[in-house]
Amino acid sequence: MSAQPAGQKLYEGKAKILYTTDDPNILLTRFKDDATAFNAQKRGSIIGKGEMNCAISTHLFQMLEGQGVKTHFIDRPSANEMRVKSVQIVPLEVVVRNIAAGSLCQQTGIELGTVLPQPLVEFYYKNDALGDPLLTPDRLLLMALATPAQVSYLQTMALQINRILTDFFDHCGITLVDFKLEFGLMPDGTLLLADEISPDTCRLWNQAETDPDRRVMDKDRFRRDLGAVEDAYRQVLERVLAQSVQL
Ligand code: UDP
């Protein structure tokens, strides 16, 4: 149930629906239980995911705001809904990696689990039809997806957010392997952290487990049919909540 009547549906994505509200500067995001992977070739549902991801994202956005990171987050009017500032989403997926996994391993041959000498920031073009390709900085500028100043700001923000999140998750007994960020432009040109930060968009490994499959606490459990997906998301939520109380 929604805490407030949603306005018009603006956009429905794979994991969230965006609605207008009475205030043109504010949008309502409803988090769904639907899960997709491999550019929506694999589809399913993770029961309770909408509420869990909304709660996890809320706590992480609030924690980041507390440490000086500007985000689109306003509040959470109901369990699976977030009110956010209306921004123009920059069509880039900014990925930060601390440990090799996923496409980095597939494309470079670097072994899964290799600790990177320093965090790697990558830009992908948010375009389903093209399969979200990895961009070189020059291609990004060629396509005018961002200005040089914006690229450098995104890089700095991504690394700052990585430092804060890595430290936070470490206190939760979780290793932040990699994650994806999206940013949005305010009418005055300010860039805000947008979208969500959740087990759908991060690779999270349980530090109490050494087994490469058992340690997975994120969407890889769904992608790779590892089972107990809901339990893993619930564990992340419980640890994030416990750690947020201590802050
Ligand atoms: N990611 C995401 N959305 C995407 C692609 C990637 O949230 O459309 C996240 C993914 O969950 C992982 C990180 O970005 O935490 C790096 O993903 P990778 O490039 O390894 O791609 P994947 O293995 O997911 O295809």
Image (cartoon, grey):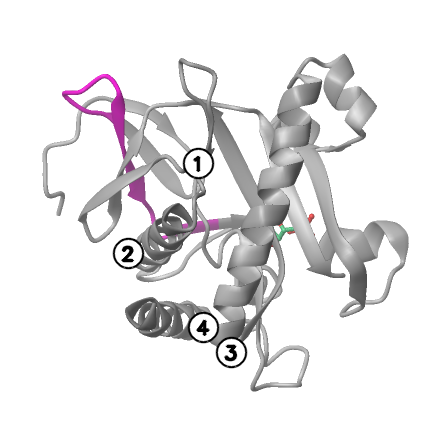
Q: Which mark is residue 194?
A: 1
Q: In x, y percent, where is residue 208?
A: 56, 86
Q: Which mark is residue 51?
A: 2
Kindly identify the residue that appears in the image at 26 percent across and 20 percent down. Answer: 25
The C terminus lies in quadrant: bottom left
Q: Which mark is residue 173?
A: 3
Q: In x, y percent, where is residue 129?
A: 64, 26
Q: Which mark is residue 232?
A: 4
Q: Nearer the viewer, residue 211 or 113?
A: 113
Question: Which is more foreground, mark 3 or mark 4?
Answer: 3
Helix, strand or loop for disc 3: loop
Against 25, is 16 above or below?
A: below
- Identify residue type, mark 4: Ala
Helix, strand or loop for disc 2: helix
Kindly identify the residue that appears in the image at 37 percent across and 72 percent down. Answer: 243
Local packing at callout 1 (Cα closer than 10 Å; few below 14, some 14-19, many 20+) is many
Local packing at callout 4 (Cα closer than 10 Å; few below 14, some 14-19, many 20+) is many
Q: Indicate left or right for 186 with 73 as reference.
A: right
Q: Between marks 3 and 1, how big is the CA–CA gap?
A: 26 Å
Q: Nearer the viewer, residue 66 or 142?
A: 66
Q: What's the magenta region?
A: 20-35
Dot 3 or dot 4, earlier in sequence? 3
